[in-house]
């Protein structure tokens, strides 16, 4: 019997990754005289991977990784105007209004009638709080957890701290690496909701053979799946 439904936020409830893609396109345009787009993308991804332990997930770490990459590919000769443009682009990302994904609001409202709802998201605290406030979904959740990363230990800590038996919990999200695989290992159900745009550092293999793994095409399929699980169908 399920009692608790957990949701990821970015690219599960609202759009997020597409803004990073647009900014990365702008980044490639600004540095087109110094590196081809594919090489620049590889260098940026390497910088993001290195910097996760320093800056964590989110726009601010992305901005710093872009600046670091710009300095590297230009041998510290990047024009100040380019750095200023990158900072301005990042600030625009931080101001950009959120846009809910289709079915997100109705799905959350439907499940809030019968289940305890948690939002478990990672990233910059201020930015995630801003997006949650703009979404107007906050009042539907019984709790919000903004964490620096999502791991088996983090999920276990959240469930233990809230007195939740993980076997009665389900987590829905667009990242196999963050939202599905570790929560299944922690004992809960993991539901994969593909978004279409996925950051390379979030790539992982789906646990197809696991009895607690499910995949749905869109979020509005979640209420029916939840009730099927509860009815053991």
Image (cartoon, rainbow, N blue to C red):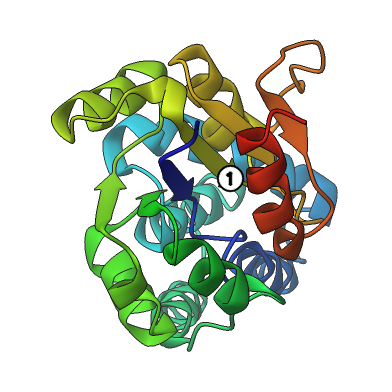
The structure residue drawn at horizontal position 74% and vertical position 32%, both measured from the top left corner, is 214
Side of 13 where 38 appears, left or right: right
Q: Residue furthest front?
A: 231
Q: Is residue 169 above or below residue 153?
A: below
Can you tell which quarter of the image residue 195 is in? bottom right
Q: Quadrant of the C terminus?
A: top right
Identify residue for label 1.
Answer: 172
Can you tell which quarter of the image residue 191 is in? top right
Would you call the spot at circle 1 few (<14 residues within 10 Å), some (14-19), or many (20 or more)? many
Q: Report helix, strand or loop for mark 1.
A: strand
Q: Nearer the viewer, residue 211 or 98?
A: 211
- Across and down, in percent, residue 39 comes to 78, 43
Report whether residue 122 is seen.
no
- Across and down, in percent, residue 9 comes to 48, 59
- Across and down, in percent, residue 168 comes to 43, 29
Q: Nearer the viewer, residue 177 or 106?
A: 106
- Across and down, in percent, residue 106 comes to 60, 77
Q: Nearer the viewer, residue 222 or 174?
A: 222
């Amino acid at each position: 019997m399920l009692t608790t439904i957990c949701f990821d936020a970015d690219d599960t409830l609202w759009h997020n990754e597409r803004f990073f893609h647009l900014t990365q396109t702008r980044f490639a345009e600004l540095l087109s005289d110094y590196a081809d787009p594919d090489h620049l993308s590889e260098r940026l991804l390497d910088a993001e991977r290195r910097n996760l332990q320093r800056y964590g997930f989110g726009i601010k770490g992305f901005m710093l990784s872009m600046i670091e990459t710009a300095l590297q590919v230009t041998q510290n000769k990047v024009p100040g105007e380019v750095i200023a443009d990158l900072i301005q682009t990042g600030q625009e990302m931080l101001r950009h209004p959120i846009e809910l994904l289709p079915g997100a609001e109705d799905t959350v409202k439907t499940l809030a009638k019968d289940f305890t709802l948690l939002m478990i998201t990672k990233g910059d605290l201020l930015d995630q709080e801003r997006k949650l406030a703009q979404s107007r979904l906050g009042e539907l959740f019984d709790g919000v957890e903004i964490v620096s990363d999502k791991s088996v230990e983090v999920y276990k800590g959240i469930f233990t701290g809230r007195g939740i038996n993980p076997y009665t919990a389900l987590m829905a999200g667009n990242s196999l690496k963050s939202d599905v695989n570790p929560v299944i290992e922690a004992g809960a159900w993991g539901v994969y909701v593909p978004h279409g745009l996925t950051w390379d550092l979030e790539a992982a293999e789906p646990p197809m053979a696991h009895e607690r793994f499910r995949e749905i095409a869109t979020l509005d399929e979640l209420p029916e799946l939840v009730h099927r699980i509860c009815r053991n169908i």
